[in-house]
Image (cartoon, helix red, strand yellow):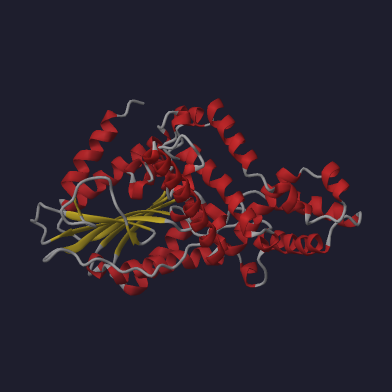
Amino acid sequence: MRRIVFFILSALFASVVSAQNVREELKQNMFKAGSNYYAYPDPQTKLTPAPKGMKPFYISTYARHGSRFLIKGREYEQPYQLMLRASKQGKLSEMGEKVLKQLELLREEARDRYGELTPLGAAQHRRIAQRMYNNFPEVFQGNAIIDARSTVVIRCIISMENALVQLTRNNPNLVIRSDASEHDMYYMNLQDSALYKKRLSKQTVDTYKVFCDNHAIHQQAMGRLFNDSAYAHDSVDTYVLNQQIFKIASSVQGTEQRYHFNLFDIYTIDELYSNWLQYNAYWYLCFGNSPYNGGTQPFTQRNLLRKIIEDADAAINSPRNGATLRFGHETIVLPLVCLIGLNGFDRQFYDLEELDVSGWLNFDVFPMAANIQFIFYRKDPKDKDVLFKIMLNEQEAKLPIPTDCAPYYHWTDFREIYLKKLNDYKE
């Protein structure tokens, strides 16, 4: 009995410590609370040397576009107009008037650029490409072949072009093929209607609502923006307003306004944490290995994973060095990470309170310009024992498969295990 009580107390203590750790992360870098709006952090990467005699010859990637504006104009317009009406009636607090001015500045910067890449978003991909070139120069030597593909969305296309321009600055002799076509959308951005219909099951929605209610902070946070509590209660849907303002606040870090103000300042650290918890749970339920909708959502990326394997096989059978670069969206990056089981993101949780406790943290996966890089190594073109490592946002990552040379893995092992996983899945 004592052992059981000790185990329970230890688990509770671990949960509290882990939650405190996420809060501490937000204290150190509050912008992580922005989830998929978190601006890509230039990593300080220390790479593990390759096994003796092995050299990189091929890179295969899938990357998210860089920082962007919000996708729809109404996402700026609706909270701005609500706050403007309140201001005209004298109902805003001093903080509320300050927020109104900031919303106006963001609204003007984004006008007619909804969903488009920001200047920072373009720079993110130039810097990532440069580090890739610096880290693995052998891949880009001579007349290396670079096959680049983008989804048909303009922010992805421009992200791709910025990366390619940066690579060309280093080596003008690169043989570059780039494309953005509906022809490739079956794997670059598969819209699986059958799986999507299962995504928001009744159990998923009910579970999420209870979780959000347990972590609600909208009344106190939004209440600070008004000087009349009765007005805020009767005339404002503070739940909706918090969602709208928090999304805009999350996006500031990707815009030029980041030099002038930070909308996250209206929240306490605990409120940032609670808002992030709700978004983290949403992304897990919709894209992770959630039991509430069958645990199959990661298989939306089955075509992409199969294409990555096919392209790698072709590169291995070629004497040429080069890279396959793909540019798309976080709604692809996250389920692909979960499908592969990278860094344990394939874990299944029945209790949403365990997500952050167990390290299922969305900002670790899909900041703006998030990227997955497969780096392939061999001794020479005749070498059949090809090794590779996988990097998530330029950090060496772990796969749930055996290896005798971590963080490197044998390609034949990966190929066998994951093709079986794909073949066993029944659509």
Quadrant where the N terminus is found in the figure: top left
| For residue 312, side relative to residue 187 (left or right) | left
Residue 248 appears left or right of 236: left
Q: Find residue 50 and report its image quarter.
A: bottom left
Image spot of residue 143 (x, y percent):
23, 66
Q: Is residue 329 visible?
A: no
At 88% from the left and 52% from the top, the residue drawn is 228
Left or right side of 82 for 127 = left
Camera sees residue 280: yes
Front residue of 315/182: it is 315
Q: Residue 329: x percent and y percent?
A: 47, 49
Q: Position of residue 154 (x, y in %)?
A: 52, 53
* Residue that appears at 16% across and 45% down: 412
In the rendered image, the residue lying farthest to the left is 382
Quarter of the figure that contains the C terminus: top left
Observer-nearest of 205 and 102 = 205
Could you say where residue 11 lies in the image, as x and y percent from the top left?
43, 45
Q: Residue furthest front?
A: 2
Q: Where is residue 382, by image quadrant? A: bottom left
Q: Residue at x 35, y 61 (%)?
A: 395
* Residue furthest right in the image: 89
How many numbered marks, from 0 up? 0
Identify the residue at horizontal 78%, vertical 64% (top origin).
Answer: 98
Residue 194 appears in which quarter of the rendering? top left
| Left or right of residue 401: residue 246 | right
